Image: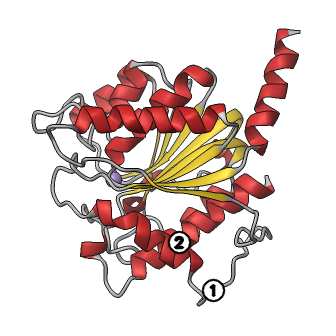
C-alpha cells in the first residue's frame, strides 16, 4: 500500500510545470566572479531567433504554455548576507515545490545547489542527483568557507539530502576529494570512463545539476575554471538524453559571461537548457 502511494507521488512530481528561476549569486566563487550575470544571458540565448524552440527529442519547449518563468530571485550577493541569501533560495524553491512546480534554476555559481537541495531533500527522500561537472565540489571547506562553490555536494551528502549522488565528467580529483567521495558513497564517473549511458538509467526522482565546465573549454570557454579534456556538446546532450527517471528539477550553473567569446557559451547553455526541458516536459 505504502509503495503504491510512493509511485503516485513520483508521477505527480513528473508532471509539474517546469519553471525557470534565475539566481544571480556568485559571491561563493573561489577564483573569478561573473556567474551572477548569467541568467539574463542564458534566457536571451534560449529565446534567440537564430534557432527554433524545439528540443532534439521533439518537444516544442518554446511554445507559449510549455513552461513558466518566475524571473530572477533578489539576493544580496554579499559575503555578509550569504546565509540570508541561502535561506531565501531554500524558501522560494520550497514554495515552488509546494505549488507542484519543477524548478529549473539558472545560476549563479555552484554554491546555490546546496540551498536548492535543502528544499528538495525533505520532500523527496529517494532522490538521485545527476551531477555534470569537471569538479566533484566535495571539499569539506575551501579557502576558509564551507559554503564555497567547491563544497555544495559535501554539505548535501552530510545532510542526507539525496539518496544517490552520481557525478559525471569529473577530471580534477585530488586525494581529499577522492576520500570525500568514498566517505559519502558518491558514484563518480570520471571523464576518462565515458561513455556511461547505462549508468544514468536510475529509478525514481532525479535532479540534474549541470555545471557548464563539464564541457571542454573549446566548446564552452565562458566559465571561470577552464579544465581541458571535457565533454563535447554532443556528448553532454547524449548523456542527458540517456537519463531515465522522473526529472523533478534542475540547475545550470557556472556560466561566466565575462569569460565568454561572442556569446558562444551562452548559446551552448541555451541549448543545454532546451534539451533538459525537452526531457522534463516530454518524459
Ligand atoms: Mn565545475
Crowding at dot 2, Cα within 10 Å, few <14 / some 14-19 / many 20+, comes out as many
Q: Single out the residue that lies furthest toward the front.
A: 74
- Counting labels gives 2
Asked if ligand 1 lies within 8 A of label 2, the reply is no
Q: Single out the residue that lies furthest toward the top.
A: 1
Q: Single out the residue that lies furthest toward the left.
A: 144
Q: In percent of the image, x 58 and y 77: which residue is there?
A: 47
Residue 275: horizontal and vertical position, in percent?
64, 65
> In 3D space, how far apart are the residues under numbered discs 2 and 1 (Cα atoms)?
10 Å
Residue 73: horizontal and vertical position, in percent?
41, 50
Choose between 236 and 79: the one closer to the eye.
79
N-terminal label among 2 and 1 = 1
Badge 2 marks a residue whose secondary structure is helix
Tell me the number on the disc at residue 51: 1
Which residue was labeled with disc 2?
270
Q: Would you say 109 lies left or right of 72 here? A: left
Tell me if label 2 and label 1 are in contact, CB under 8 Å.
yes
Amino acid at each position: 500500500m505504502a509503495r503504491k502511494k510512493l509511485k503516485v507521488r513520483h508521477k505527480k512530481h513528473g508532471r509539474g510545470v517546469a519553471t525557470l528561476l534565475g539566481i544571480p549569486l556568485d559571491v561563493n566563487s573561489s577564483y573569478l566572479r561573473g556567474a551572477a550575470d548569467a541568467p539574463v544571458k542564458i534566457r536571451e540565448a534560449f529565446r534567440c531567433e537564430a534557432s527554433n524552440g524545439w528540443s532534439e527529442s521533439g518537444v516544442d519547449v518554446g511554445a507559449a504554455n510549455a513552461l513558466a518563468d518566475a524571473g530572477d530571485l533578489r539576493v544580496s550577493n554579499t559575503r555578509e548576507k550569504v546565509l540570508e541569501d541561502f535561506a531565501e533560495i531554500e524558501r522560494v524553491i520550497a514554495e515552488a515545490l509546494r505549488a507542484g512546480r519543477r524548478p529549473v534554476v539558472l545560476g549563479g555559481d555552484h554554491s546555490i545547489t546546496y540551498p536548492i537541495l535543502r528544499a528538495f531533500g525533505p520532500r523527496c527522500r529517494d532522490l538521485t542527483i545527476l551531477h555534470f561537472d569537471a569538479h566533484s565540489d566535495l571539499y569539506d571547506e575551501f579557502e576558509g568557507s564551507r559554503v564555497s562553490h567547491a563544497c555544495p555536494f559535501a554539505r548535501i551528502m552530510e545532510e542526507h539530502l539525496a539518496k544517490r549522488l552520481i557525478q559525471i565528467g569529473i577530471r580534477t580529483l585530488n586525494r581529499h576529494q577522492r576520500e570525500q567521495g568514498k566517505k559519502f558513497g558518491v558514484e563518480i564517473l570520471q571523464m576518462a570512463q565515458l561513455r556511461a549511458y547505462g549508468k544514468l538509467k536510475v529509478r525514481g526522482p532525479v535532479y540534474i545539476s549541470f555545471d557548464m565546465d563539464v564541457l571542454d573549454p573549446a566548446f564552452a570557454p565562458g566559465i571561470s575554471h577552464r579544465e581541458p579534456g571535457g565533454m563535447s556538446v554532443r556528448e553532454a546532450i547524449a548523456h542527458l538524453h540517456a537519463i531515465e527517471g522522473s526529472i523533478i528539477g534542475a540547475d545550470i550553473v557556472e556560466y561566466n559571461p565575462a569569460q565568454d567569446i561572442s556569446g558562444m557559451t551562452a548559446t551552448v547553455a541555451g541549448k543545454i537548457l532546451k534539451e533538459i526541458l525537452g526531457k522534463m516536459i516530454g518524459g
